[in-house]
């Protein structure tokens, strides 16, 4: 089955950039409204009119610049802050001295905070602190002296921008950590998938060649010995890791990027009868018991469930002997599909599964439990020494890849 690459982009910054763009437009309109309401009190209103015309054109023309971090360049930030500082300093030339002494607003008013917030979102709290300092100096120069209102306004902008800058830095770090975790999880699932395929094919063949070669003897025994060595080496590789986690890249415009290789979803119409897939396992030593009606599952789920049954029967032949008998029971319940594989072998000694997994023998861990986990199901193994082994494979109907029966 062909695989496809799914690209996931994660960015906590994009909502902040959108909010900043809206803030700049609204505060520009607010600053213009303040001037219109008090234009008669200005000493030189034409200076304010010229500045507000420039501010309106600049704000609307630069909206694409505050769309994301990539567009918001350092040159833009410098010019944007210069527009704010110029407006603050021009207040002395446009407004009446009495209004300035009474604590009247500067020409850009709270629009200035948007310029500082752009520094915070782009570069973090250090950039925000530097921009806030320049705004504070410009306000003191415009007032001509320190005042309580000036200090209050400057501190408010400074604290808010630094706090937002710090939050952005923390969010970026968390974003990278989450992206890395998702990438590792995806790589682990791909490794387990490859390990299952290798276990179900190559390792089984190597083990068979080793057994048959030892039994035949002669040159075949040497071939069996070499197959055994390759089996051990391959099991070590499977246990140690077949897939290297890829690098989590970052795009300044879109945030962290995670590329996940996954199996394509089955088409809605791709379903099959589980009984048809299990039928070839029935034989003289394997008894298959199934409902009289079709057990219809999505094709991918049915294949994985069938492969888990095959892995269980391989374990029966390998560990219980060629003479062991096995029974497959298929139950089609309203909330789940259950397949039970039972044998009359000697059972599994306590602690043997953990030991086998440590040795790289991952038949139960990957070929059975791993497959069921990937389709949202569970696999339980019950074994009592001397009384055989029973493997119960359960897949809930509301799990991914499972289709409900027509009569549900």
Image: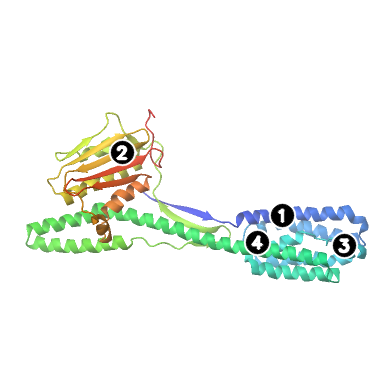
**Residue 142 in the figure: left or right of residue 341:** right
Q: Is residue 144 above or below residue 48?
A: below
Query: Disc 4 marks which residue?
Result: 164
Q: Nearer the viewer, residue 408 or 222?
A: 408
Nearer to us of marks 1 and 2 is 2
The label shown at residue 290 is none
**Inter-mark Cα distance, 1 to 3:** 24 Å
Query: Which quarter of the picture shows residue 42?
Result: bottom right
Comes first in the chain, label 1 or label 3 = 1
- Counting residues from the start of the chain, the first of labels 3 and 4 encountered is 3
- Check the image and tell me how it is coloured: rainbow
Disc 3 on helix, strand or loop?
helix
Identify the residue under disc 1: 23
Viewer-side residue, 250 vs 170: 170
Q: Which residue is mark 3?
A: 47
Q: Percent from the top left, x then y, of residue 149?
A: 82, 64
Q: Position of residue 225 (x, y in %)?
A: 14, 63
Which comes before the other along the chain, label 1 or label 2?
A: 1
- Residues packed near mark 4 inside 10 Å, few (<14), some (14 to 19) or many (20 plus): some
Residue at image coords 33%, 53%: 193
Q: Residue at x 22, y 62 (%)?
A: 232
Q: Residue at x 77, y 57 (%)?
A: 57
Q: CA distance from mark 1 to mark 2?
A: 57 Å
Which label's residue is closer to the chain start, 2 or 3? Answer: 3
Q: Which of the two discs, 2 and 3, sits closer to the camera?
A: 2
Left or right: 314, with 323 as reference point: right
Q: Which mark is residue 338?
A: 2
Q: CA distance from mark 3 to mark 4?
A: 34 Å
Q: Secondary structure at mark 4?
A: helix
* Marks 2 and 3, how far apart at CA: 81 Å
The number of callouts visible is: 4
């Amino acid at each position: 089955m062909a695989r496809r690459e799914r690209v996931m982009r994660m960015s906590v910054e994009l909502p902040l950039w959108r909010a900043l763009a809206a803030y700049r437009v609204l505060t520009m309109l607010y600053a213009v409204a303040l001037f219109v309401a008090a234009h008669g009190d200005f000493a030189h209103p034409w200076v304010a009119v010229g500045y507000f015309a420039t501010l309106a054109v600049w704000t609307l023309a630069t909206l694409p610049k505050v769309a994301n971090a990539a567009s918001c360049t350092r040159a833009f930030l410098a010019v944007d802050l210069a527009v704010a500082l110029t407006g603050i300093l021009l207040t002395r030339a446009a407004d009446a001295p009495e209004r300035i002494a009474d604590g009247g607003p500067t020409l850009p008013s709270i629009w200035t905070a948007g310029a500082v917030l752009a520094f915070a979102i782009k570069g973090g709290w250090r950039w925000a602190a530097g921009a806030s300092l320049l705004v504070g100096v410009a306000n003191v120069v415009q007032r001509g002296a320190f005042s309580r209102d000036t200090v209050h306004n400057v501190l408010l902008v400074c604290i808010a921008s630094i706090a937002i800058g710090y939050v952005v830095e923390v969010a970026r770090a968390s974003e990278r950590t989450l992206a890395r975790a998702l990438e590792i999880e995806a790589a682990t699932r791909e490794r387990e998938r490859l390990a299952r395929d290798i276990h179900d094919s190559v390792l089984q063949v190597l083990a068979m060649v080793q057994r048959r070669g030892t039994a035949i003897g002669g040159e075949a025994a040497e071939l069996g010995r070499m197959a055994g060595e390759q089996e051990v080496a391959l099991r070590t590789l499977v246990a140690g890791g077949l897939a290297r986690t890829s690098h989590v890249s970052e795009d300044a415009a879109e945030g962290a990027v995670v590329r996940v290789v996954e199996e394509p979803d089955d088409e809605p119409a791709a379903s099959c009868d589980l009984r048809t897939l299990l039928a070839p396992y029935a034989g003289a030593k394997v008894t298959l018991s199934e409902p009289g009606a079709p057990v219809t599952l999505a094709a991918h789920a049915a294949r994985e469930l069938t492969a888990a049954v095959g892995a269980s029967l391989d374990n029966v032949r390998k560990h219980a002997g060629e003479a062991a008998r096995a029974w497959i029971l298929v139950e089609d319940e309203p909330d789940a599909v259950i397949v039970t594989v039972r044998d009359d072998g000697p059972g599994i000694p306590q602690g043997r599964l953990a030991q086998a997994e440590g040795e790289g023998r991952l038949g139960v861990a990957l070929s059975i439990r791993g497959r069921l986990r990937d389709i949202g199901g569970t696999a339980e193994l019950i074994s009592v020494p001397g009384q055989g082994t029973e493997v119960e494979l359960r897949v809930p109907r509301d799990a991914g890849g499972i289709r409900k029966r027509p009569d549900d």
